Image (cartoon, rainbow, N blue to C red):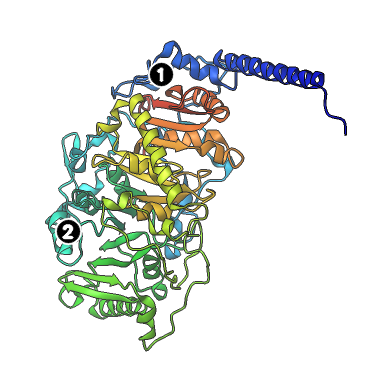
């Protein structure tokens, strides 16, 4: 074979040099074109960050509260953008999936009519829910625990109905919450002290709690000072505005009920569950509701039942119920508790406490009655609109080790991660996720200096992932409702609870189970990319607006192409907004849209749909 000549080598070298020089020129021109602001939406971000300005303070975007403004003062002059009109005044407290008029068309058996029943597409409101006349920003925590402005939830029936039980009192232009409850008229603190004599509430062992039939959530409100966070729920207006009052106070709560479908929480989520005269028929339906508590209760967790039928021998006369009926009710509860392998730890006065055993297999092997029916579902966290059944959810053996006490639990490797229970999530990816969100949150704080101030008490993360945003923003001044969408690629809500945080499953094509104006800050990471082929973006934005308080803040992180579409829709809402760069610079296609909801109220004659 002939060797290549020197001339051939020189020709080949010349071609290579020409190619390299050509490529250098091409990438130089491409970089200059991108920096000029004409590439993939960067022009918007560069407009904000030009002149080398940092985003410590974003101009023309006020995060402060002003308590002023009317519908008539809103500028609707942008003819290129669809403008969303205000809804009628009677919708000030509208909850789409718990609408009272629609609810009455469903069966009353097993509280079905009080469950979620969302409107079909043709009945959805495409208008913006107004705040009531006189609405003001709630008091900061901890004052909000005890006082709520009357104008924000102007309903007085509880002040009469629960007057002797110290739930709520009306004083001038505010409601005062003395901390009482039906079973603790002397105050929630003393009641919690009684529980703490049996349950390790004060050392971080018990961190997450579930309060069923919570009333105005005073139990959860007073647990906060002991570093315990409670997920409280109650039906919509069994007592007028109870969940609304809880959220106005700054206490985690949702509208919910024990009915015919499973609770929207993962298995083994809570360290403690609680019922204080919550009127749930625990022994009915073969113990179906106790079995659902067992599903969401962590092995070693506690169940507290105070009120009827506990201590029925003494109280059947004051309760005005036949003692035979109460005796049978308690017998059924004790029978189901035994099947569930719950060990009774205490029964004093009207408070009974059980503990779920950590080794249920050996417990059942010792039981005389082996008639326990186990649930067939292979996924105990698959609960969205799934029917409740009288069956016991098997407790899987998790090899990831025990949970650490809180606050160490917040950043320790969760057992679901260390055991490999979440596909694609390893200890390394979990730690990297935490680092990334600490970086993101630090960037947010440069944009909005109020994030650390206590201005935002009720915070929601609409696509929470592993809960790292909530961990990074964790503070005694705030709490985060971590929402894991039902269509998310990975079911991570169990990890979030193992971190000592709280959250809920939800499908954002539907309304959230809360009253309007119940969150101060909403965070949405990748949410609109997730849902862009599932439902209308404007429906999600209108739902965000419904649950966001006037002058509340929004942080949306997503791909720039998605955010440009979102930004156009927001142009027709009463939000001030800016699109800013990723903290790593304008060439990163992921951007951040920040917004503040304007203050505006109904133009008068508000009527409630209560």
Q: Nearer the viewer, residue 385 or 607?
A: 385
Q: Earlier in the sequence, mark 1 or mark 2?
A: 1
Mark 1, Cα crowd under 10 Å, few <14 / some 14-19 / many 20+, is few
| Residue 588 seen in this snapshot | yes
Task: Tell which residue pokes out farthest to the top in this image.
Answer: 51
| Residue 551 seen in this snapshot | no
Secondary structure at numbered mark 2: helix
584 shown above or below 368:
above
Residue located 34% across and 19% down the image? 57
In the rendered image, residue 517, in percent from the top left (x then y), is placed at 36, 36
Q: Nearer the viewer, residue 13 or 83?
A: 13
Quadrant hosting residue 364: bottom left
Q: Is residue 122 left or right of residue 482?
A: right
Q: Which mark is residue 192?
A: 2
Assign the N terminus to one quadrant of the image: top right
Question: Quick check: marks 1 and 2 in contact, CB under 8 Å?
Answer: no
Question: What's the distance in space between the residues labelled 1 and 2, CA to CA?
Answer: 49 Å
In the rendered image, residue 162, in percent from the top left (x then y), is placed at 20, 53
Quadrant hosting residue 580: top left
Assign the C terminus to one quadrant of the image: top left
459 shown above or below 102:
above
Residue located 14% across and 60% down the image? 193
Residue located 48% across and 59% down the image? 383
In the rendered image, residue 15, in percent from the top left (x then y), is placed at 75, 19
In the rendered image, residue 279, in percent from the top left (x then y), is placed at 30, 64
Q: Nearer the viewer, residue 358 or 7?
A: 7
Secondary structure at numbered mark 1: helix
Q: Which mark is residue 72?
A: 1
Q: Is residue 477 left or right of residue 364?
A: left
Mark 2, Cα crowd under 10 Å, few <14 / some 14-19 / many 20+, is some
């Amino acid at each position: 074979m002939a060797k290549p000549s020197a001339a051939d080598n020189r020709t080949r070298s010349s071609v290579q040099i020409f190619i390299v020089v050509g490529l250098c020129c091409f990438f130089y021109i491409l970089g200059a074109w991108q920096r000029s602001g004409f590439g993939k939406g960067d022009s918007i971000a560069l407009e904000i960050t030009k002149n080398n300005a940092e985003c410590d303070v974003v101009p023309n975007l006020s995060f402060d509260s002003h308590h002023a403004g009317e519908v008539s003062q809103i500028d609707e002059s942008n003819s290129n953008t669809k403008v969303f009109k205000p809804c009628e005044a009677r919708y000030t407290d509208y909850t789409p999936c718990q609408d009272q008029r629609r609810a009455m068309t469903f069966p009353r058996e097993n509280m079905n009519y009080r469950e979620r029943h969302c409107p079909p597409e043709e009945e959805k409101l495409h208008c913006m829910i107004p705040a009531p006349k006189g609405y003001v920003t709630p008091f900061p925590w901890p004052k909000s625990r005890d006082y709520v402005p009357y104008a924000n939830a102007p309903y007085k029936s509880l002040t009469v109905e629960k007057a002797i039980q110290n739930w709520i009192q009306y004083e001038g232009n505010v409601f005062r919450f003395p901390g009482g409850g039906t079973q603790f008229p002397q105050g929630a603190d003393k009641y919690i002290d009684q529980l703490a004599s049996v349950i390790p509430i004060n050392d971080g062992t018990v961190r997450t709690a579930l309060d069923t039939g919570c009333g105005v959530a005073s139990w959860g409100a007073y647990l906060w000072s002991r570093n315990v966070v409670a997920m409280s729920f109650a039906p919509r207006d069994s007592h007028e505005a109870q969940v609304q009052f809880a959220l106005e106070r700054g206490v985690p709560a949702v509208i919910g009920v024990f009915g015919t479908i499973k609770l929207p929480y993962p298995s083994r989520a809570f360290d403690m569950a609680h019922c204080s005269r919550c009127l749930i028929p625990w022994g009915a339906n073969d113990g179906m509701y106790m079995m659902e508590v067992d599903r969401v209760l962590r092995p070693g967790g506690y169940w507290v039942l105070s009120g009827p039928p506990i201590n029925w021998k003494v109280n059947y006369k004051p309760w005005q119920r036949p003692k035979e009926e109460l005796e049978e009710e308690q017998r059924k509860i004790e029978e189901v508790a035994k099947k569930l392998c719950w060990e009774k730890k205490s029964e004093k006065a009207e408070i009974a406490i059980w503990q779920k055993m950590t080794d249920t297999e050996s417990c059942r092997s010792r039981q005389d009655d082996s008639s326990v029916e186990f649930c067939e579902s292979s996924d105990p966290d698959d609960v969205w609109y799934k029917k409740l059944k009288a069956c016991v959810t098997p407790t899987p053996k998790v090899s990831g080790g025990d949970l650490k006490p809180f606050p160490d639990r917040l950043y320790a490797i969760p057992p679901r991660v260390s055991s490999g229970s979440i596909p694609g999530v390893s200890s390394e990816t979990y730690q990297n996720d935490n680092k990334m969100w600490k970086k993101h949150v630090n960037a947010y704080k440069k944009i909005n200096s109020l994030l650390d101030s206590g201005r935002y008490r009720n915070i929601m993360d609409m696509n929470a992932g592993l809960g790292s945003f909530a961990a990074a923003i964790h503070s005694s001044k705030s709490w985060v409702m971590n929402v894991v969408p039902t269509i998310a690629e990975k079911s991570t809500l169990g990890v979030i609870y193992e971190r000592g945080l709280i959250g809920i499953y939800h499908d954002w094509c539907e309304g959230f189970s809360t009253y309007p104006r119940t969150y101060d800050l909403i965070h949405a990471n990748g949410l609109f990319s997730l849902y862009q082929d599932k439902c209308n973006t404007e429906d999600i934005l209108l739902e965000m607006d419904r649950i966001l308080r006037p002058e509340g803040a929004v942080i949306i992180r997503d791909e720039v192409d998605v955010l440009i579409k979102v930004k156009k829709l927001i142009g027709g809402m009463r939000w001030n907004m800016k699109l800013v760069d990723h903290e790593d610079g304008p060439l990163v296609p992921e951007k951040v849209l920040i917004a503040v909801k304007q203050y505006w109220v109904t133009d008068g004659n508000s009527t409630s749909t209560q």
